[in-house]
């Protein structure tokens, strides 16, 4: 089984299922399986019209988005290998990677990524496709002599071919065929490791994630803006096809506002986002007042080690259980204490309520719940990462997440390393 074959099957059986949402200009735009199948087949047919085919490497240098995902699967459908690079890589690193993998074409996100490729051309690159063509008026003209060298994504999709033709071609692919090359930044060695994955390896990585996290069709997953990260790639591209989850792609990371709108059950770990959410939690703790603030500071003052919280917490936590029991006791007492005068009854009920409130503060339940809601993680049961955090990276933000009862589930997604280049990261 391959990713294009899986997309074709799922779009035929469940065409109207929303598998991806993308945050753009303050709005979550929904994309069904049929939408992405149509986009992938059009891009794949367009690449085939440029003379690209089995074994050719198509580089994708763009932020995570539905078009980038469709471009990867579309290229795979005609037998090409998609090399996915982080948009944060510096120009020199991008050119070194393109030369190492011998990319025949590059799909870039915008003017910034285009400049990284064309300031110093790479000999193997024959064609460049621009997703966001704003500022590229010269390539929108018809009849240009370089029409096969620089074109917009819309021009590529309009070059002909049908979805049935793309399906027919992808049906002949094998799971052992190379599918994707991920260029993973190793910050410790300051190198970019070039990992190659077959279709079977990508599907296995998604199944490993499923086993570690326990996906359900009701799961909503939040990812950031880098398809170059292995776990983010597995969650964004493969998991929606294998596990039927819905993926929400942030425009430029995940803001607190977008997280509150999504209320994800799983989140892909991104170090920049981790630092941001840690700062947000600290700010909310510092500005909380009253019992809520007391509870939050009590809970976060003695942080638990990251990853020790259960991935699936009980439906009713201990504090909620105490509150429910106290309320039931008070209700039963009011029913059976008809012989007591009203003053005594009120005093007894007030004492019970006070005890429940003090237990709540002691356990820190109300403050922690409030903070989780505030950062959009009230339903989040796990954060997914491809590697454990070291001590320096996990302090203080990761420990705060551990205190909120949100573990990091580490699921390595390692491929065959085919090379390394010097790493320069812009951000």
Image (cartoon, rainbow, N blue to C red):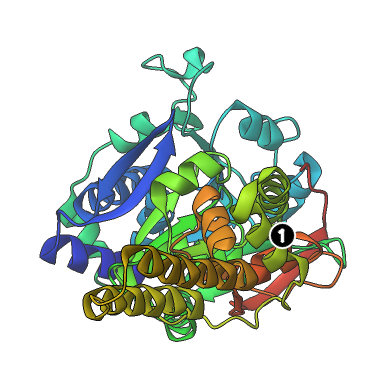
The quadrant of the picture occupied by the C terminus is top right
Residue 147, position as x, y percentages in the image? 44, 26
Is residue 194 at least partly visible in the picture? no
Considering depth in this image, is 84 or 138 the residue closer to the camera? 84
Considering depth in this image, is 328 or 167 the residue closer to the camera? 328
Q: Quadrant of residue 412?
A: bottom right
**237 vs 328: above or below:** above
Q: Is residue 43 left or right of residue 393?
A: left
Considering depth in this image, is 395 or 350 the residue closer to the camera? 350
**34 vs 350: above or below:** above
Residue position for label 1 = 297
What SS does tag 1 mark? helix
Q: Is residue 358 left or right of residue 72?
A: right
Q: Residue furthest left?
A: 13
Residue 211, position as x, y percentages in the image? 44, 86
Count up the numbered dots.
1
Q: Is residue 167 left or right of residue 132?
A: left
10 Å crowding of disc 1: few (<14), some (14-19), many (20+): some
Q: Residue at x 67, y 67 (%)?
A: 299
**31 vs 174: above or below:** above
The quadrant of the picture occupied by the N terminus is bottom left
């Amino acid at each position: 089984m391959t990713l294009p074959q899986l997309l074709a099957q799922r779009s035929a059986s469940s065409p109207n299922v929303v598998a991806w949402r993308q945050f753009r200009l303050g709005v979550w735009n929904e994309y069904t399986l049929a939408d992405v199948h149509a986009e992938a087949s059009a891009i794949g047919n367009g690449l085939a019209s440029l003379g690209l085919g089995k074994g050719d490497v198509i580089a994708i240098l763009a932020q995570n988005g539905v078009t980038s995902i469709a471009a990867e699967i579309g290229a795979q459908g005609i037998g090409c290998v998609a090399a996915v690079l982080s948009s944060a890589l510096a120009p020199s690193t991008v050119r070194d990677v393109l030369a190492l993998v011998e990319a025949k074409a590059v799909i870039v996100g915008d003017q910034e990524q285009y400049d990284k490729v064309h300031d110093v051309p790479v000999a193997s690159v024959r064609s460049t496709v621009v997703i966001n063509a704003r500022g590229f008026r010269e390539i929108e003209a018809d009849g240009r002599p370089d029409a096969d060298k620089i074109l917009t994504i819309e021009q590529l999709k309009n070059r002909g071919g049908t979805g049935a033709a793309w399906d027919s071609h992808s049906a002949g692919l094998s799971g052992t065929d190379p599918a994707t090359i991920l260029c993973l930044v190793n910050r410790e060695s300051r190198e970019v490791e070039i990992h190659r994955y077959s279709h079977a390896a990508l599907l296995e990585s998604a199944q490993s994630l499923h086993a570690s996290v326990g996906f359900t069709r009701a799961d909503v997953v939040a990812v950031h803006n880098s398809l170059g990260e292995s776990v983010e790639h597995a969650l964004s591209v493969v998991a929606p096809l294998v596990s039927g989850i819905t993926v929400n792609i942030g425009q430029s990371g995940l803001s607190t506002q977008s997280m509150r709108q999504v209320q994800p059950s799983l989140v892909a770990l991104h170090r920049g986002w981790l630092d941001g959410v840690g700062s947000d939690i600290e700010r909310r703790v510092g500005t909380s007042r009253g019992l809520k603030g007391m509870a939050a500071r009590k809970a976060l003052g003695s942080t638990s080690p990251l990853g020790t919280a259960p991935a699936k917490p009980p439906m009713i936590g201990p504090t909620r259980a105490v509150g429910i029991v106290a309320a039931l006791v008070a209700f039963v007492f009011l029913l059976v204490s008809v012989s007591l005068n009203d003053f005594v009854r009120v005093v007894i009920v007030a004492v019970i309520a006070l005890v429940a409130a003090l237990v709540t503060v002691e356990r820190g339940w109300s403050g922690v719940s409030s903070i989780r809601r505030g950062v959009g993680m009230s339903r989040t049961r796990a954060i997914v990462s491809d590697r454990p955090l070291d001590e320096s990276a996990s302090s203080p933000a990761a420990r705060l997440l551990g205190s909120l009862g949100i573990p990091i589930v580490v699921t390595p997604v390692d491929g065959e390393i085919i090379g390394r280049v010097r790493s320069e990261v812009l951000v």
